[in-house]
Image: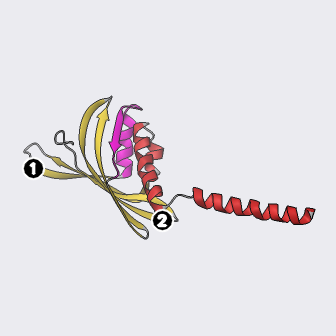
Amino acid sequence: MQKKLNKNFLLLLISTVITGSTACAQNAEDSIKTVINTMFTGMKNSDTVLVKSCFTETAVLQTFGKDKEGKTIITTETPGDFAKIIATIPAGAADEQIIFKDLKIDGPMAAVWTPFKLYFNGKFYSCGVNSFQLVRLNNVWKIQYILDTRRKTNCE
């Protein structure tokens, strides 16, 4: 009787551990949101190591902007360039608040659309949209590409 009870307890324990670990595992959408939120946490905390950990080695960051004549231009940065900028900002100064508007996944590729408002030292600085392209490499989601718009008006 005691051996049967111990065996049943052991089976119940193993079943609980397996079920519990499966329930706690993040799905792809949660993992994608986590890497994007981690990048913004690193940005807010001026943590360049954390920021760079969110990107692939060949990632590209691009921004639409205006030149002195008012013509639309696109600037391009690497994650290293971005990290250098982040390193110059005091921790807590830059707070980019995003909304996950649209998220599409096809196997190891994902596209995410996030409208944002950026605050600097607690004051509104700009708004726009981030378009992220992510890839899953070695079962880890990483940012491969960001294209963003920036403006000061029409932020609602």
Residue type, mark 2 in image: Leu
- In the image, 57 versus 135, the foreground residue is 135
78 lies left or right of 52: left
Q: Quadrant of residue 94?
A: top left
* Residue 96 at x, y percent in the picture: 34, 40
Q: Which residue is mark 1?
A: 71
Depth check: give the residue in front, 37 or 88.
37
- Residue at the left extreme of this rendering: 69
Q: Residue at x 25, y 35 (%)?
A: 125
Residue 47 at x, y = what percent? 45, 40
The residues colored magenta run: 79-100
Q: Nearer the viewer, mark 2 or mark 1?
A: 2
- Identified at 16% across, 52% down, the residue is 73
In the rendered structure, which amino acid carries the disc numbered 1?
Lys
Q: Does the magenta run of residues contain 152? A: no
The residue indicated by pointer 2 is: 137
Q: What is the x, y in percent for residue 61?
A: 31, 53
